[in-house]
Image (tube, rainbow, N blue to C red):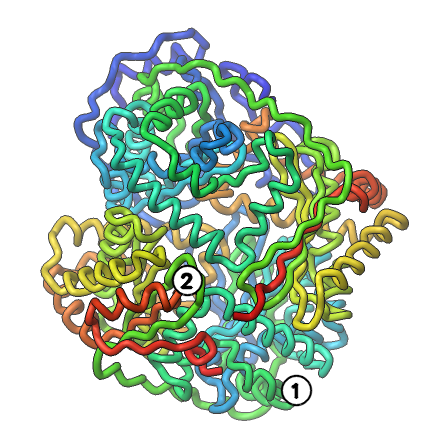
Amino acid sequence: MTLSSRLAPLACALFVGVSLTAQSPIERSKPPALGPTPQLKLPAIQKSTLSNGVPVWLVEAHEVPMVQISLLLKAGAGDDPSGKFGLASLTAAMLDEGAGSRSALEIADEIDFLGASLGTSSSFDASTVRLGVPVARMGPALTVMADVALRPTFPEAELERLRQERLTDLLQARDDAASVAPMAFARLLFGPSNRYGTGVIGTEATIKGFTTSDLNAFHSAWFQPANATVIVVGDVTATSVVPLLEKQFGSWRAAGAAPRRTAVPNAPQPAQRQIVIVDMPGAEQSQIRIGDVGVPRSTPDYFTLQVLNTILGGSFTSRLNQNLREQHGYSYGASSRFDMRLSAGPFIAGAGVQTDKTAEALREFFNELTAIGKPVSAEELTKAKNYLALGFPSQFETISDFSAQLEQLVVYGLPDNYFADYVKNLEAVTADAVMKAAAKYIQPQRFLVVVVGDRKVIDPGIRALNLGMVRTMSVQEALGE
Amino acid sequence: MRRPILLVLFALLTVPLGAQSPAPLQVPFQQFKLANGLNVILHRDPSIPLVAVNLWYYVGSANEKPGRTGFAHLFEHLMFEGSKHVPEGQFDLLLEGAGGDNNGSTSNDRTNYVIDVPSNALELALYLESDRMGYLLDTMTPQRVDGQRDVVKNERRQSYENRPYGMASIELDKMLWPPTHPYSWPTIGYMEDLTAASYSDVVEFFKKYYTPNNASLVIAGDIDLDRTRALVEKYFGEIARGTIVEPVAPPAAILTDVQKKTITDKVSLPRLYMAWLTPRMYAPGDAALDITASVLAGGKNSRLYKRLVYDMQIAQDVSAFQQSGALGSSFLIVATARSGHTAAEMQKVIDEEIERLQRDGPEPREVQRAINQMEASFYQRMERVGGFGGKADQLNAFAFAGGSPDFFAEDLARYTSLTPSDIQSAAVRWLPADRRVELVVEPEEKR
């Protein structure tokens, strides 16, 4: 918009420090219009290949003298062998507990001394070693990173330590309703044998069973050049960084043929609605989770579902939050999401609600989950699309934001024009498509409902809603322990 | 106490950086005051087409009266519920429709509001932010207060009552500070005080504290400086100046002995909290205690982590931090026991390590490692313009502390100039064994 000429002299007057009394009120009857939408000009993804075939994706970002270098492996908890749930996650966690000639303490000391951070982790779909470091100290940090990723030693003593740490994590998770609820929901929805029914770190039984041979086997099978991509974002150029990467990763060779990934089987949908109350005596709030088996990341309905979920529970002004928080005050916040993975993860809606309003809150959840099947207004559709499309540039603000975006492209095999077409794809979503997607993907009659709370207080009200069969469980039962 | 800020100030970096430090710790800015007293700071960073509008009101829970604890935070919630020209619900709807996000937070010392929008929605953000500064009470009702009272009570249940160990911080502050000191009560407030908060409290609080002369506005990002300045004049210039807010005058806070307490919670493992009263933010000793915290519990090689978690494996975790405030600070060590181990076992080791640090001081490499980590965190904090802790928020934080908004390099120098003997002295002076708080959270009897 152009500047009102009335204002310019006023600004000048203030600039020289003349004290003025408050100006007369301005016109506020309607909010100012938005200017032309700014164009996001993303820097190019510079692609190259190391001599052993490992792809390197590089994005220059020169605002801050930092760089993030990530080694991404297409292998995650979804690739855990049956009976060894948690192996990918433990393998990743053990990478920096001894590697090359360095001990766990030496690795940590060197990385910390360089002002760097080195993270090793696994999700269901991928494993990553991420190094963040001031550019001036990139060389020595990269040497440690390469040892950690390629030459871990998996010392027995460190395995025992991490084993006890993880068993204690599981023990502590039981204390927290907000941790129990999603774990119980996943287990009851997917079952104990489907990989998605158990968290990435596995169960007490599997964690107790892991040996260093398991770690070595997983590492040598999956940490291979054919599975790997290096992603670099930061204050570097191809000339400054690719020779370093070649030196550290270029001579890496496969131990054997890379295994084929087997998709996590798609879990069956629940046949009918059921309610599970998980007892936490004395809880001040009930943690509610509602949903079913959702969709994989490869769904052709991806953009429609993003818009649908933004309307339902993906933002502050979404229906669930407006109802449960703003209208009724039952909760500090309510939301929903489709957890999209290589195979279909859960669709999950949830909130923490005050104990004495648990049944009322459940009723409102189902009101909204039913109402989303009706046509959405043009206004609501536009708001949701704009929120996602106009907010897209903020996903690229920091080097770690940008790296995370690039990781998605690699892990899910998204096309090169994915970012360029993102807004166009959102804009193409119609009200009709949203309604069809709601009918297909939001089916309250088969939803699993998990409520973690004070059973003796909430049980009668929940049963009186007549939502379906109600079962009660202890925390241990719900988590299969 | 804050120093008055010059009426008009154009400033660039004033202190030269060390030769090895690269340029981006410079944050060029313009600062000026409106006639009504509103402090305004502009910073241009066009790297992404985003704008951060960051407004601090110089009021927090330290300004509350006993019996009305939690009010500053409850009030923060009401700021999102509509104002004279912005009907209830529209604040969020308009911003989300423009692709923006917003939030607010309340601490002991201040309340901040963040709006992050694509650069074409700057004027919308200023319209909304100024409307609630100028016209909040025009449409405020007792029903709105009731609605957010319920939400805030659920925030408290979710973050304190229903969170493992959630009540410990509330107990700890009660033990550390005298009952008349405003840091003795929680920012979230006591439940009974939240119940008691009334519509007339809202009116009084707004008139007293939510004035342009008690606030500072930072606009940072992809902006045109002249146009932004004109828009600020347009939207905020008409709001009337308020009365002067007297600074909080807290009673002296001194620990003269060891305060011990044990509480129970629905948890599986005992947790130990040890706490000391320490120098306020930016005062001598404050930075040294940040580095002391890192030497004690930052990373695998830190003294407490290495012994408790790595070697002995009697603790699941340990952390240490200097919690800095404008009226005073506290230094905390928190450790959770492994199954079969006790708070007393952990405390014995912690005492040994503090004594050793006081007696022998740290190794130079330990201190340098902590400083290098701190330095990298300064650069990382330059990456984001908006949100909590982004550049806009940091400019306001420095302005609030009374210095130049671009205090980044000086702030970093507080750390890079520290020596091992500074850390030793801080440990001796501020972490005495005979003047502190010891709080233990034990598991309730098995139900």
Image quadrant in which the N terminus of chain B is located: top right
Nearest the viewer among A414 and A219 is A219
Asked whether, in this view, residue A320 is left or right of residue B225, the answer is left
Quadrant location of residue B317?
bottom right
Residue at the spot 35% in from the left edge and 55% down from the top edge: A354
User: Is residue B379 placed above or below B87 in the rendered structure?
Assistant: below
Q: Is residue B431 above or below residue A229?
A: above
Residue in the image at 62% along x and 61% along y? B442
Spot occupied by residue A269 in the image (x, y as percentages of width and height) = 25, 82
**Count of labels in the image:** 2
Left or right: residue A324 compared with residue A109: left
Q: Kindly state the secondary structure of the residue where label 2 is placed.
A: helix
Determine which residue is flagged by label 2.
A405
Considering only vertical position in the picture, is B3 above or below A294?
Answer: above
Of tags 1 and 2, which is closer to the observer? 1
Q: Which mark is residue A451?
A: none
Crowding near the residue tagged with mark 2, few <14, some 14–19, many ≥20 C-alpha atoms within 10 Å: some
Q: Chain of mark 2?
A: A
User: In the image, is residue A21 above or below residue A407?
Assistant: above
Name the image quarter holding residue B336: bottom right
Q: Amino acid at mark 1?
A: Thr
- Residue A263 percent location from the top left of the image: 38, 86
Residue B375: image location, x then y, percent: 66, 46
Q: Are marks 1 and 2 in contact (CB under 8 Å)?
A: no
Question: Which residue lies under the disc numbered 1?
Answer: A212
* Pointer 1 or 2: first along the chain: 1
Residue B117 in percent (x, y) is at: 34, 42
Instruction: Give the spatial CA distance, label 1 vs label 2.
Output: 33 Å
Splitting the image into 4 quarters, where does residue B286 fall? top right
Chain under disc 1:
A
